[in-house]
Image (spheres, rainbow, N blue to C red):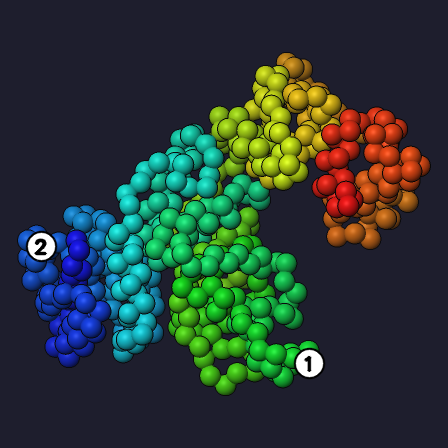
Amino acid sequence: MSVKTALVIDDEPDIRELLEITLGRMQINTRSVATIREAKALLTKHEFSFCLTDMRLPDGNGLEIVEYIQQHQPRMPVAVITAHGNIDIAIESMKAGAFDFISKPVDLAILRKLVNTAIKSGNLPSNTNNKSTLLTGESPSITRLSASIQKLARSQAPVYISGESGSGKELTARSIHNLGPRASAPFIAVNCGAIPRELLESELFGHIKGSFTGANQDKLGLFQAAEGGTLFFDEVADLPLDMQVKLLRAIQEKVVRPVGATGEIKTDVRILCATHKNLEQEVIQGNFRQDLFYRLNVIQLAVPALRERQEDIPALAERLLKKIAHSVGQEPLALSSKALTTLTAYSFPGNVRELENILERAFTLCENDLIDEPDLQLPITISKVTGNQSSSTVKNGPTLNHFQRCLEHDSLDEYLEEIEKEVLCSALESSRWNKTQAAKKLGVSFRSLRYRLQKLGLDE
């Protein structure tokens, strides 16, 4: 529809008049009614760009309108108007399919943002193609997940994404953002467990100059940096309890108070969150606030583990090998049929992230243009492939010296990277930085050596 039209449902004449004037100034035609019966009569005869409905109406509840529109015109955004502080009803309406909510007294600036987002949402193309998301695969579980992503992208409801580590929760969040009306605005991901506790409030809400030692200038928080877009809280279960209280208020009231500020700043962001932990269990154990869980868990989306969609491994491996090759400016390698069979049979406790690490290692170690089974160096021998139940064992454990050095690093990967740098530098120094000779001494191909040097930042 070239001319935008809105249906307003409210039994208070003053509210209807205010909304009509505001929408009229936005070049939107408005039809206003006071009851559910009148609204349904109009909906059967006319098409609307979006709908604004009060929750308390003379002949029923606004949820009836939400459910009616979901049934008869599911692509039309409907936002609900709730009494101030009545967040429970707002959550119920979004679970029923409402696009968003706004509280009374109506803030016109917030209303205009909501309306603009609703119009964008209504104009989004209808697409059921898996390739429209960032997820790779054609398995039934990924097809269902992609369909849910496309549906949720139109809404502004908070989404709680559950799934094992490395399964693709952030890609799922990015897909929801990219397919929604906020796609042109920022998508900001924050790992709640990676920010020091004493800096969390400043990172999320910002601070003003002089508010604490070291605050030499004003700083925007992540809520303000994501204005108009999406804020994704990864590993949200790692938030300390005192910060959970402040996050809850920011989400419910749509305002933040920078550290040291006397006033609050309005925000317009969509909230997505994820964790590999069982958030319901964290609530039971007292590690996560029940009210925050209720606010974040408006809609739950489960990302399947890689072992639950093994038919997607060939396509995932091909995409990841292209990504690895592109990062170092080389041609992608292929997998032998035996290597692919072995990968497909492996259980992948680390999911897609582990698959990427395995392929990156194989890309480095492979001496030709085809990655074979030995190049994968999987931690176990796959019984499905060999027919024998066996496992590889480490004959010699790490020496105490190595163990102590490893404890000095944040992770085993960081320690192994340091050892690899030491070995490479030693080989290059002994060969007077002749890379061909260094590769020969190390027993690897020149291409493999060059890849390792690029990955570790030693190729300058």
* Residue depicted at x 65% and y 79%: 216
Q: Give the image quarter of residue 383.
A: top right
Q: Residue 250: x percent and y percent?
A: 45, 71
Residue linked to disc 2: 46
Type of amino acid at the residue the image marks with label 1: Thr
Q: Do the residues labelled 2 and 1 touch (CB within 8 Å)?
A: no
Dot 1: element: loop
Q: Give the image quarter of residue 321.
A: top right
Looking at the image, is mark 2 or mark 1 earlier in the sequence? 2
Pick whichever, 308 or 127, lies toward us: 127
- Residue 349 appears in view: no
Number of residues whose C-alpha sits closer than 10 Å to that of mark 1, classed few (under 14), some (14–19) or many (20 or more): few
Most distant residue in the top direction: 387
Q: Residue 401: x percent and y percent?
A: 91, 45
29 is higher (above) or lower (below) than 445: below
Dot 2: element: loop
Q: Residue 46: x percent and y percent?
A: 9, 54
Number of residues whose C-alpha sits closer than 10 Å to that of mark 2, classed few (under 14), some (14–19) or many (20 or more): few
Q: Distance between the residues labelled 2 and 1?
A: 60 Å
Q: On the rendered image, what quadrant is the C terminus found in?
A: top right
* Residue depicted at x 32% and y 52%: 154
How many marks overall? 2
Pick whichever, 217 or 266, lies toward us: 217
25 is higher (above) or lower (below) than 116: below
Q: Residue 117 carries which label?
A: none
Residue linked to disc 1: 213
106 is higher (above) or lower (below) than 394: below
* Residue depicted at x 79% and y 52%: 409
Type of amino acid at the residue the image marks with label 2: His
Most distant residue in the right direction: 430
* Residue depicted at x 28% and y 75%: 108
Q: In this view, does 412 lie to the left or right of 48?
A: right
